[in-house]
Amino acid sequence: MMVLQALRREPLHGYALAQFIRRASGDLLQIEEGSLYPALQRMLKAKWVSAAWGISGTNRRVRIYKITAGGRKQLEREVSSFERMIEGVARVLRPSQT
Amino acid sequence: MKDHDLSQEIRAHIEEKIAELVEAGVPASAARAQALREFGNPTLIAEASREVWGWPSLDRLWQDVRYGARMMRRNPAFTAVAVLTLALGIGANTAIFGVAHSVLLAPLPYPHSDRLVFISTLNDQVVGAPDYFDLRVQAQSFDAMAAYIYQDSNLEAGGDAMQTTIASLLGDMWALTGAQPAVGRLFRQGETGGVVLAYRTFEQRFHGDASIIGRAVHLDGAPAVILGVLPRDFQFLLPTELSLIQKKEIEAYIASPFTPVNQPHAAPQTRSVSVVARRKPGISLAQAQGEVEALMARIKAQWGYMGFIYSQMSVRVVPLQQRLVQNARPALLVLLAAVACVLLIACANVANLLLARAATRQREISIRIALGAGRLRVARQFLTESLMLALAGGAAGLLLARWGVAALIRLGPADVPRLNTASIDAWVLAGTLGLSILTGLLFGMAPAISFSRGLHDTLKESVRTTSPSRSAQRLRALLAAGELALALVLLAGAGLMVKSIWRMNVRPAGFDPEHTLVMRVSLSGERYRTLPQKVAYFSTVLERLRGAPGVEAAGVGTGGFMGPLNVDEIPPEAGAPSTVVNIRLASEGYLGAIGLRLMKGRWLSDDETAPVAVVNEAFVRRVARGQDPIGKHAFRAMIVGVVEDLKADKLDADPAPEIYTPYSKSILPFMSMDVMMRVSGDAAAAASGLRSVAAETDPAQAIYGVQTLDRALAESIAPRRFNLLLLAIFASVAVLLAAIGIYGVMSYTVAQRAQEIGLRMALGAGRGTVVRMVARQGMLVAGAGISVGLVAALGLMRLMASLLFDVKPSDPQTFAAVAAGLAGVAFLACWLPARRAARVDPMVALRHE
């Protein structure tokens, strides 16, 4: 979900994507950067993102990922279900807070 | 392309990271390390990414298969033993299943075969011919009904007489069987004087020459015409009770001369026929049975004077297919169970082999797990290897089965219907495939399970102590015990059948079938219409035979008649039906020729003046109710003697009550007689002499089946001997496999305990002590298996009761012998490794430390 969220703002290449996610999660998520790639491949297969070769800011030949229409729809679905989940958690928490 | 993209992309990622880290002031070498650390394992990630696009499970399966194939190649001996064991198990199962499938399950090759029924009112076999005519007209439950009898006739074509097995047909037989002529035409109902040939007869006797259609022939002396030929694939699959010396295959068909006019209810000598019919759609078996019962009750009320016949009446309407296989079915089911046992034993054996090998592969597996293979992945690897073994075994088994089915067809007894159509078809193939997979799962489970426990420690241990866990060892002992139990069940079955056959062959003193020749002579033609003419013929033959060298006694006799009889002076118990008695016609010399012993009174002579009869002991027991029958009357004759019981027809039948009357005064019509001759010396050599004497007397009369009584009797139990042969083969395979199983377990144990044994011997244990210790351990396993097997066999053998003769399914002698025999084999299998253990050199064993 995070990947799609990031790509909605702008097309990114793999390394930039990893940096973005790290910063966005406030270095909280200690995941291996590499695990991004199987996830990207899955999304490519599901046609949520598309990829094209391009040149990075540091002048390297990289693959740049772009979100597709299908990806946007998927993101909306996931966001709403995620929000519902958060909402549910909040409701469950509320009584104990009061 | 994709692979290349991916690795390039990953490389770019890492380089970018390094560049960034270097910019931030990290030294180049440290930067690379950190970048890689944070990225993770590039190869694994690349692999995981690629898997997204592929069929990962299929990929892994292919990997497992390749790995398995490598393992199989590396251990050719192991592979060969495992595949061979499985091939034996699967092959035997496939062959028996193939036979059972075509005999028991495949529908009969007739239209609407599911609606065909077999109707009987007497003895579960026949219907009186007059009753058949009534049923055919009156019964509403059927849309077709037909009747048939088998007969041996003398078919003479172009001066060449040959005994021919003929089906004489009544009613809609062609419609019922859907038969169409291959050549010529079929006869119409009641069109006597026409002969239709079976294809094989047409081919072999008439060389497939279509010009024989319309040719005049003689059938039992009466003129007839060949009308047509049935197609090659037409099979006349109708129930028949084979009697002594009878051919198996129908060679020609004629329309029966029976009509309601010549087979009236009122006549004392009407014939019986076998009846088949086709139920109308929507009519159930019960409805059909009900209608036939009602009609027969009406016939019985109307023709009550024939009450003694109808007192035996029991109406049965059963599906034709069921009736056809009723004799073969129990045997086939027992054989199926037996081969299943063999397969289970084979599975246990291969499981044992795999377990033993798994122990040696423990380090390899531990390393794989340490390198990141999932537990599930390892279990799957094992299952894949097992399945590969099983499929290889299945493929080899299929070859064995093809050969096995061919052998079964060749050796099988003639009374198994449709045995010759048995083949390995798609159904059987599917069955074999399923069986192979099931087998693979079954024996692959053991090592897979044994690895799901206690693996972590293996790596830590030194090479020396890689011994299998105690649980694996227990599992192996359990498997070996199970094999022995199954083997015992099979052995018990085979043992009971051996004893049955042995009991059948117990014969009274004086009966010497090896030196008794039997020949059936069938009289036909104008010259033998009357009784004196027939008697004259046989008298001449007998006189000539008695004069021949080496002949000690000669006589004629015939069976084939039966009826419910009473001793006039001894009425049956109130309400009890009369007992059915075999009526035999015999000559004066018959007693001596067949070796029958006279117990009381006298035998028959060829020139009796008053009607007399001789009965056997079974007759005294069951009809005369134990009283002395001499001087009393039965069958309109005075009983003058009692002879012992003799199993002269079928070995596997209890002696039936019999009454003998002089053939020279016979009130029953007979066309054929069995000529019996007791010879001294070589019986086979005398056979040709017998044939020529009969031929000299009248060359036009067909003589057939000259053989020793011994051979004829042996043929009567051919199906049982065949079952025994198969069961014995399966039991020996089972015992062999089980012995290998327990031998394997014990050898392995001894190898594992070599050090311990060495230590014991170093501390002063004698060789005898060591042998005893190891053997005791093995025999404990064997004892457990044999005990369980005994209990199981006691329970299961009751299912075999119908295959046994004069032996109780729980025969203690057989069970004791079988258990002792198996224990002996098991002991040998334990003793060999035990002796090897005792030869362990303590120094060598200890130096291994």
Image (cartoon, rainbow, N blue to C red):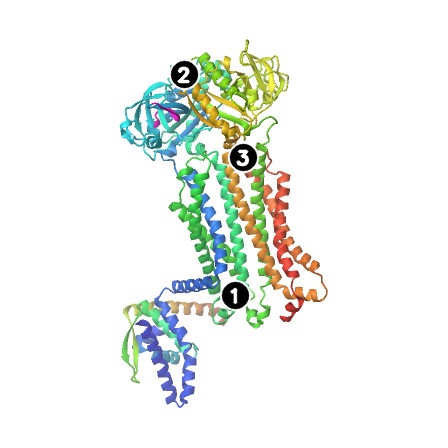
Residue most toward the right? Answer: B764
Q: Main secondary structure of the magenta part?
A: strand
Give the alpha-carbon distance from disc 1 to disc 2, as whole Å.
82 Å
Give the alpha-carbon distance from disc 3 to disc 1, as whole Å.
50 Å
Residue in the foreground of this view, choosing between B639 and B407: B407
Asked if residue B184 lies left or right of residue B141, the reply is left
Q: How far across and down, in percent of the image, does residue B655 sit?
A: 57, 26
User: Of callouts 1 and 2, which one flags the residue occurring earlier in the amino acid sequence?
Assistant: 2
**SS at circle 2:** loop
**SS at circle 1:** loop
Q: Is residue B170 magenta?
A: yes
Are discs 3 and 1 located on one and the same chain?
yes
Which residue does the numbered mark 1 point to in the structure image? B361
Amino acid type at image mark 2: Gln
Query: What segment is highlighted magenta in the picture?
Result: B159-173
Amino acid type at image mark 3: Ser
Q: Residues within 10 Å of mark 2 (few under 14, many from 20)?
A: many
**SS at circle 3:** helix
Image quadrant occupied by the N terminus of chain B: bottom left
Q: Badges 3 and 1: C-beta atoms under 8 Å apart?
A: no
> Residue B802 shows which numbered tag?
3
Which chain does the residue under circle 3 lie in? B
Confirm whether residue B658 shows in the render.
Answer: no
Amino acid type at image mark 1: Arg
> Residue B683 shows which numbered tag?
none
Which chain does the residue under circle 2 lie in? B
Which residue does the numbered mark 2 point to in the structure image? B263
User: Of callouts 3 and 1, which one flags the residue occurring earlier in the amino acid sequence?
Assistant: 1
Q: How far across and down, in percent of the image, does residue B323 sit?
A: 45, 32
Image quadrant occupied by the C terminus of chain B: bottom right
Q: Is residue B236 above or below residue B576?
A: below
